[in-house]
Image (cartoon, helix red, strand yellow):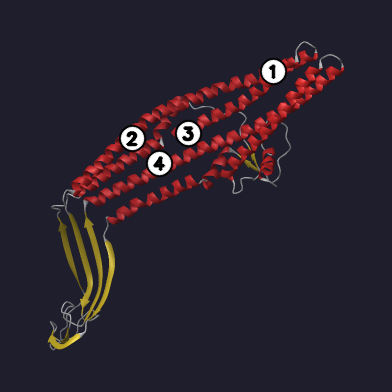
Amino acid sequence: MGLLDSAMVARSQASVPDVATAAPAATSVVITLDEAIRRAQSSDANYTAAVAAGRSAALDPAIARAGMLPTVRLYNQDIYTQPNGLYSEGGEGVQSPDPKFVANDSRPREYIAQGLVDETLSLAGAAEVRHAEAKAAQAKAEQEIARRGLVSAVTALFYSSLAADRKLSVAARARQEAADFTKLTEEREQARESAHADVVKAELEEQSRSRDLEDAQVAADAARLELGVLLFPDPRTLYTLSAPESAPPLAPREDIDAAARNNPELKSALEALRASNADVLAARAAYLPDIRLNVTYGIDANEFAVNGPLTASGLSARNLGYSTTATVNIPVWDWLSTEHKVKQSEIQRQAAQVALTATQRQLIARLDEAYSEAATARDELASLDLSVSTAAESLRLTKLAYTGGEATVLEVVDAQNAYITAQNAREDGRVRYEAARARLQTLTGTM
């Protein structure tokens, strides 16, 4: 089975409420909008990358805080140096050969087994923690931006595919209507109630509707395949779209404005500014001294033992012990590199402030634009439904008038075209409204 053939089979399973269709195949999957969003979140590469980046960045604050805590490590070393043939008495009163390398202690063998605790106290460490926390929050906001963008895209594809299926049903009905009208003109011609020109006009209209039906099927197949790419490993999988007949209501403007305060793009810009502030603090920390502390406990002796060998007096030295060091590093001169780094960080912070202000302005404008679009699309839905009903009644009356010889074939064709246009416009209006609501969702979250 070819790609288009499979897609045509999938299309035939679409849910079209206003047209009687055969029951879907047992293998067809029922897909609601929520299910489509859930499936898309597990398969979309961009959203998966945003989730991975957010989870990775969430670990950075813990890593940065760990960098401010003492580190513990074990240090073990065995040093052997060739003797030079001379002997000397060590501090423990024991005769031992001297090493050829004087730098290697005073014995041929040296054993080191120590536990070391190191700690560095500096303002730069605190700044790094702040930076990591800000970046983690920014990554979380970016993940939310990706999620809302995916929801908007899936919503548009979902209702576009549903509209394409319904337009296909409209085209099928129009094709049948044209065929019935052709039959009517032929009957009237045989009864000598109309001219043959009416039959020709009706046949031309029927041929046009047949082509429209083929085009509508291609569009429906393409829309279902495009959505299927996000939903299934094989986009040719059979599925049935399920959506409420009536469009959901639009939230009041006050609720929209309140929800917009949680806009992730605004949060991302705020966290970017916060990270820039931390970078400025880290750069300025280089002007200040840092303190390094070390505690060492273990042995550094010529014998790998807690106690040294016994001397002639019966005493022995204890090898196990500790030492501590404290180092204060005071910066004096670095050829103005610290000053330049501070200026760089301040430049970046200024850019982040401008970006935040621009994001706030864009949010206000986009919110007004999106809500106005959604409100207009919502108000037009009732008008579009009325237009469909009016066009259907107009077609019915025009056909009756034609049957009674009071209307021309052109009037019937015009009425047919008006009815088809009204039905397609209604489907486009539903898509427009749902897409506008989805755009609002990217700004405000779940409505």
The residue wearing badge 4 is: 141
- Residue 356 is marked as 2
- Which residue is more in the foreground, 309 or 391? 391
In this picture, is 148 found above or below 307?
above
User: For the view shown, which residue lies furthest in the right direction?
Assistant: 191
Residue 16 in view of the camera = no
- Specify which label sits upstream in the sequence, 1 or 2: 2
The amino acid at mark 1 is Asp
The Cα–Cα distance between marks 3 and 1, rounded to whole angstroms, is 40 Å
The Cα–Cα distance between marks 3 and 2, rounded to whole angstroms, is 21 Å
Measuring from the top left, give residue 287's x and y in whole percent. Answer: 17, 49
Query: Considering the numbered disc 4 on the image, is that residue within a helix, a strand or a loop?
Result: helix
- Residue 228 is marked as none
Q: Are marks 3 and 2 in contact (CB under 8 Å)?
A: no
Could you classify mark 3 by the number of other residues whose Cα lies within 10 Å: few (under 14), some (14-19), or many (20 or more)?
many
- Specify which label sits upstream in the sequence, 4 or 3: 4
